[in-house]
């Protein structure tokens, strides 16, 4: 495929519909998970212009910062801590409409107002989380959840 991302002007659902096959094409041609995480973070970030888009990988029992787009971020998060560590411990997607209302939220950036964290599950284990931050309140909904869960499952096919 061409190395250039095609981004449509349209609804969130239309943007995801355009994005998913492009992610599938990129990921199916590469077996290295970190390389694929890097391109997925880039493609999501460029499509939606989020504040921060990236991965934390499970390494030796904690989350360690992986490929991302956006400002400087905290490097390590313990299991059960913050939105990321909670999504890992609970093994499901967390949508946080207002980060100030989430007990224990870890503020890597004071600009972040809302957040979604999706676990990346491979062979029954959480191997990473996809974390996206927005500078606006209530950015994320079920459309994001459904599509980001599809994207994280594509990531682990190789
Ligand atoms: N807010 C996250 C920490 C990671 S940064 O947002 C990039 C959390 O509470 O886990």
Image: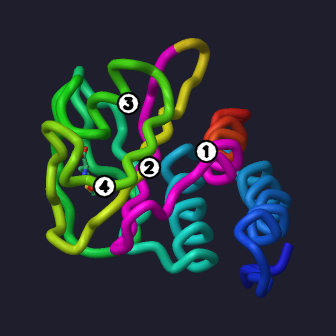
How far apart, in angstroms, are the residues tagged by discs 2 and 1? Answer: 8 Å
Could you tell me if the residues under marks 2 and 1 are in contact, i.e. CB atoms within 8 Å? Answer: yes
What secondary structure is found at the residue carrying circle 4?
loop
Dot placed on the residue nearer the N-terminal end, 3 or 4: 3
Dot placed on the residue nearer the N-terminal end, 1 or 3: 3
Picture coordinates of residue 26, whole percent (x, y):
74, 60
Indicate if the residue with disc 2 has its beta carbon within 8 Å of ligand 1: no
> In the rendered image of this protein, does residue 59 appear above or below residue 54?
above
Residue at the outermost top position: 124
Which label sits on residue 145?
A: 1
> In the rendered image of this protein, does residue 99 appear above or below residue 47?
above
Picture coordinates of residue 133, whole percent (x, y):
37, 62
Taking the spot 70% from the left edge, 49% from the top edge, the residue there is 147
How far apart, in angstroms, are the residues tagged by discs 3 and 4? Answer: 16 Å
Dot placed on the residue nearer the N-terminal end, 4 or 1: 4
Callout 4 crowding tier (Cα within 10 Å): few <14, some 14–19, many ≥20: some
Which label sits on residue 98?
A: 4
Q: In this view, does 38 lie to the left or right of 137?
A: right
Q: Which of 75 and 17 is in front in this view?
A: 17
How far apart, in angstroms, are the residues tagged by discs 4 and 1? Answer: 16 Å
Could you tell me if the residues under marks 2 and 4 are in contact, i.e. CB atoms within 8 Å? Answer: no
* Residue at image mark 3: 87
Indicate if the residue with disc 3 has its beta carbon within 8 Å of ligand 1: yes
Picture coordinates of residue 34, whole percent (x, y):
49, 49
Which label sits on residue 116?
A: 2
Taking the spot 76% from the left edge, 71% from the top edge, the residue there is 15
Q: Quadrant of the C terminus?
A: top right
Callout 3 crowding tier (Cα within 10 Å): few <14, some 14–19, many ≥20: many
Callout 2 crowding tier (Cα within 10 Å): few <14, some 14–19, many ≥20: many
Q: According to the image, what is the colour scheme of the structure?
A: rainbow
Dot placed on the residue nearer the N-terminal end, 2 or 1: 2
Question: Which stretch appears magenta?
Answer: 125-148
């Amino acid at each position: 495929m061409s190395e250039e991302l095609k981004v449509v002007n349209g609804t969130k659902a239309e943007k995801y519909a355009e994005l998913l096959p492009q992610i599938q094409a990129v990921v199916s041609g590469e077996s290295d998970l970190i390389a694929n995480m890097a391109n997925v973070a880039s493609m999501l970030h460029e499509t939606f212009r989020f504040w921060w888009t990236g991965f934390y990988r499970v390494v030796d029992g904690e989350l360690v910062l992986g490929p991302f787009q956006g400002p400087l971020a905290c490097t390590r998060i313990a299991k059960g801590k913050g939105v990321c560590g909670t999504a890992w411990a609970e093994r499901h997607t967390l949508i946080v409409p207002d980060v100030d209302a989430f007990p224990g939220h870890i503020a890597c950036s004071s600009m972040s107002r809302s957040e979604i964290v999706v676990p990346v599950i491979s062979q029954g284990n959480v191997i990473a989380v996809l974390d996206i931050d927005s500078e606006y309140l209530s950015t994320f909904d079920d459309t994001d959840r459904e599509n980001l869960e599809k994207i994280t499952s594509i990531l682990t096919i190789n």
